[in-house]
Image (tube, rainbow, N blue to C red):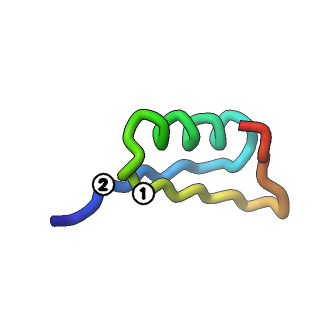
Amino acid sequence: MQKERLVIIGGDAAGMSAAAQAKRIKPELDVIVFEKGPHTSYSA
């Protein structure tokens, strides 16, 4: 069985908050975040 994946475009505060919320709701979910810049937000 294939795992579910969530792909988030943008590693700013909104993207990382969405990733954190998704993992809280469904811990077994694979979350992938794409960010074109050199930095991501760690404030989620």
- Residue at numbered disc 1: 30
Total count of labels: 2
| Residue 8 as seen in the image, left or right of residue 12 | left
Q: Are marks 1 and 2 in contact (CB under 8 Å)?
A: yes
Q: Nearer the viewer, residue 10 or 43?
A: 43
Q: Secondary structure at mark 2?
A: loop
Q: Tell me the tag on residue 4.
A: 2
| Mark closest to the chain's N terminus, 1 or 2 | 2
**Residue at 80% across / 59% down in the picture?**
37
Query: Residue at 59% of width from left, 56% of height from top?
Result: 33
Q: Quadrant of the C terminus?
A: top right
Look at the image and tell me in which quarter the N terminus lies. Answer: bottom left
Image point (22%, 65%), residue name:
2
Q: Quadrant of residue 12?
A: top right
Few, some or many residues within 10 Å of mark 1 (<14, 14–19, 20+): some
Amino acid type at image mark 2: Glu
Q: Position of residue 14 (x, y in %)?
A: 67, 34
Query: In the visual, does 20 lie left or right of 36?
Result: left
Question: Does 22 appear above or below 6?
Answer: above
Residue at the location (70% across, 49% down)? Answer: 11
